[in-house]
Structure formats: C-alpha cells, structure tokens
C-alpha cells in the first residue's frame, strides 16, 4: 500500500473530522506552472505575490519540540486520539518534527494537529506525521528545508486575523522562496504555510525573522 493510501486509510478510521492528506508526488507531471487555488482568491498569481521581495531574515518552523514532548508524554494528540506507532514501510512521508521525509521502515506517529496562525472559521486540524520517538528536530531554522525542496507545495498566506490571504502553487523550494518572500513583503500577511498539493495538509510555517 502506498504512503498516500495508508494515510488516507488511517485518517478515515481514526480522524472522522479531519481532512486526509496524500503525500505522493505522482501528480507532479500534470501541474506545469503557478496556479490559483479554486475558491481562495480571484486574483492572479502575480497579484497575490504583490509585495516587494526582500532579503530579510525568515524563520522556518516545524512543530515546536515542546508541543511534541507534550503529545508524546500524554500518549494522545490534541484531539484525544491515542498514539499508535507504525513502521512507514515505503518511506517518503513528510515529518513535521524535523522537516524531512521518512526513510523506509522508520517508526512514525500519525497525529491530529492544528497549525499556527489560523483562527475562527479558518482554524483547522489535520493529520501530520512525526517521529515516534524524539529526534533532533529541525536545526537550520533560517533555511528552506533542503530535504523537502524537491516537493511541489502550496504556499498559503494568512493575515493577522488568521484568515487566508492567498495561495500559490510552487514547483519546488527555489520557486517557493520567491513566493514566500513576496507574500511576506505584503503588510497584510503575518505568516505562510507550506502545504501538500493533493489534500492541502500542513507541512511547516514561515514567518519574518
């Protein structure tokens, strides 16, 4: 069973109110350029990224280690689901604790998690993979995660009220950096999320340093 199918099966059994997430890169060949997300905005990609891209410091945020420690110590995620370690037989799942993909056979946890920066009707909880045991975390917080830079992503912007302020499909990490800097140059944008293309699952957040 593929990683995407396994997660869909896991989520449908354990998280009835959570949107599923596919991690497969199989659709990458059909997406050829920056695209507007249906229902997010009527503006073009160029209008969305309307800030002046700067060279200021950016902070790339995994799930905070303190949050991970609390979840593991409690033996349950924030939704009350009991933790159940599993071996990721095929690998390739984005690990939100250290911002790299899992290796085949690594023990992981699938947990429900609410990403930062969302509030009100835009607050959402979704499934994410983390290591089953504590790991070293993500140590280069001022750098786009190199182990995820090959992945297509959606860069989704949020304003100070936690509302979605735009979304842009990017090819890879280099493309993402241009979009991230442009979005965070906008005065109405507080932070951005990097999300998987297929089902919109959260990977990490980026803020101004």
Image (spheres, helix red, strand yellow):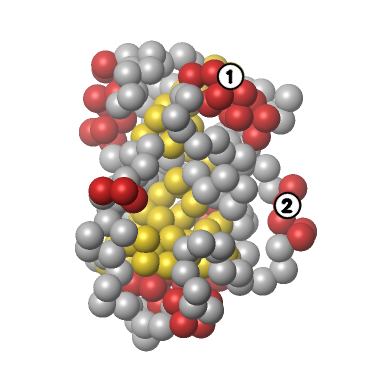
In the rendering, at what x and y percent does residue 24 appear? Answer: 67, 42
| Residue in front for this viewpoint, 142 or 64 | 64
Q: Considering the numbered disc 2 on the image, is that residue within a helix, a strand or a loop? A: helix
Number of the label disc, if any, that sits on residue 164: none
Name the quadrant containing residue 162. Answer: bottom left
In the rendering, at what x and y percent does residue 115 appear? Answer: 34, 44
**Quadrant of the frame with the C terminus:** bottom left
Q: Is residue 68 above or below residue 74?
A: below
**Quadrant of the frame with the N terminus:** top right
Q: Is residue 155 above or below residue 182?
A: above
Q: Kindly identify which residue carries mark 2.
A: 27
Local crowd at mark 1 within 10 Å, few (<14), some, or many (≥20)? some
Horizontal side of residue 52 vs 27, given as left or right: left
Q: Residue at x 53, y 26 (%)?
A: 11
Horizontal side of residue 85 vs 136, given as left or right: right
In the rendering, at what x and y percent does residue 99 appear? Answer: 46, 45
Alpha-carbon distance for marks 1 and 2? 25 Å
Q: Considering the numbered disc 1 on the image, is that residue within a helix, a strand or a loop? A: strand
Q: Kindly identify which residue carries mark 1.
A: 87
Q: Residue at x 40, y 22 (%)?
A: 133
**Are the residues flagged by discs 1 and 2 in contact, CB closer than 8 Å?**
no
In the rendering, at what x and y percent does residue 92 appear? Answer: 62, 38
Q: Residue at x 62, y 41 (%)?
A: 23
């Amino acid at each position: 069973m593929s990683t995407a199918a396994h997660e869909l099966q896991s989520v449908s059994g354990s998280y009835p109110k959570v949107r599923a997430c596919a991690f497969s890169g199989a659709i990458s060949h059909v997406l050829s350029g920056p695209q507007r997300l249906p229902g997010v905005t009527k503006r073009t990609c160029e209008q969305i990224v309307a800030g002046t891209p700067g060279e200021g410091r950016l902070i790339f945020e995994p799930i905070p280690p303190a949050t991970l420690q609390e979840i593991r110590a409690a033996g349950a995620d924030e939704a009350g689901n009991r933790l159940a370690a599993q071996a990721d037989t095929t690998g390739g799942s984005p690990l939100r604790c250290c911002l790299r993909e899992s290796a085949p056979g690594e023990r992981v946890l699938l947990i429900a998690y609410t990403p930062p920066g969302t509030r009100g009707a835009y607050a959402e909880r979704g499934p994410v993979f983390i290591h089953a045991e504590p790991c070293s975390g993500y140590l280069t917080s001022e750098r786009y995660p190199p182990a995820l830079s090959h992945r297509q992503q959606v860069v989704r912007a949020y304003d100070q009220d936690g509302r979605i302020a735009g979304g842009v499909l990017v090819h890879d990490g280099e493309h993402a950096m241009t979009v991230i800097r442009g979005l965070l140059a906008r005065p109405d944008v507080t932070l951005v999320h990097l999300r998987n293309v297929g089902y919109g699952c959260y990977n990490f957040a980026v803020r101004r340093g």
